[in-house]
Amino acid sequence: MIRIAIAGAAGRMGQAIARELQGNNELFLVAALEHKHSSALGQDIGLMCGLGTTDVLIVDQLDGGSFDLLIDFTQPESTMEHIALCLENNAAMVIGTTGLNDPQKQMIVDAGRRIPILLAANTSVGVNLCASLVEMAARVLGDVVDIEIMEAHHRHKVDAPSGTALLLGEAVAGALNKDLDRDGVYERYGYIGERVAGSIGFSTIRGGDIAGEHTVMFIGESERIEITHRATDRKNFAWGAIRAASWLSGQQPGFYRMKDALGLM
């Protein structure tokens, strides 16, 4: 049995993961972590998720050696603290936090020298399959087409573009030897002139309870190819996170991505 701790346990993703771990014969939920000001502290995570009593209470600190792997869907600053916790406990870590800056990402890569650590812009199996398809399409179509990435999320999402949109953009950029810092276009307003050839455009929508929608458009003169993923429930992200955790638990220290866990090239 692999002992699992969830960081951000009272959040939408934390609860979804807790529900999907119920009855898992390999991964066993032993700890639920929240920040010290959370109103959920002391509550049974099972009761919060509608599962009944589990005797796993939400806490703001974890005991050393009490878990084997931490699944983290929180905020960048909290994730950095949790990396230190995992390093101290020699525990593996699956990170689904988005909005990380470059130094924070480097800290994750560095932690991979000591523990197995997986960073996922999106844990959905379908999204990661789409990223592979996008990379293939970009490689075949090249700069003959204009490439635009559209994403939509619920009103509570705080970062934009989404980590998934950037994941898809990186798949395009990697296939075409481009750099998103140079070739990505994130804002359009006023008199902007003609579209710059070879640029990668991003559009963002925020509203309601949209779990996540992403479309990559390859727009030519006489045809348009669209690769789209729509999530209707967060459980698909939870399934992917659990699949990643199961795979990561058997790995040596290293820095991994979802494509490694899924066997995608």
Image: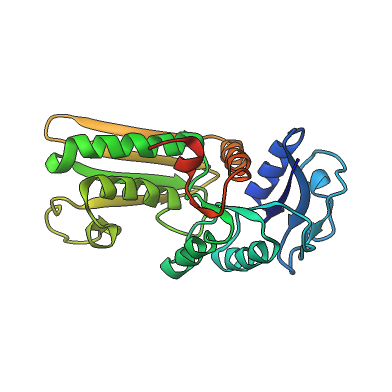
Q: Can you see residue 131?
A: yes
Q: Where is residue 39 in the image (x, y as percent from the top left)?
A: 77, 62
Residue 72 appears in the picture as rendered: no
Q: Which residue lies furthest to the front in this view?
A: 252
- Judging depth in this view, the residue of 232 and 114 nearest the camera is 114
On the rendered structure, is 108 left or right of 167? right
Q: In this view, does 8 lie to the left or right of 101?
A: right
Task: Identify the image quadrant of residue 61.
Answer: bottom right
Query: Of residues 219 and 140, which is closer to you in this image?
Result: 140
Q: Where is residue 130 in the image (x, y as percent from the top left)?
A: 39, 35
Locate residue 255, reporting x and y percent.
Answer: 49, 54
Residue 50 location, quadrant: top right
- Give the image location of residue 171, x and y in percent: 32, 45
In the image as oriented, which residue stretches furthest toward the top? Answer: 223
State whether residue 156 is above or below residue 139: below
Give the left or right position of residue 55, taking residue 101 as reference: right
Could you tell me which quadrant the C terminus lies in? top left
Which residue is at a point 40% across and 55% down the rendered structure image?
Answer: 161
Number of callouts: 0
Its colouring scheme is rainbow
Q: Which residue is drawn at 37% across and 39% down?
A: 131
In depth, the one of 206 and 184 nearer the eye is: 184
User: Relative to residue 65, is residue 224 drawn left or right?
Assistant: left
Q: Look at the image and tell me in which quarter the N terminus lies.
A: top right
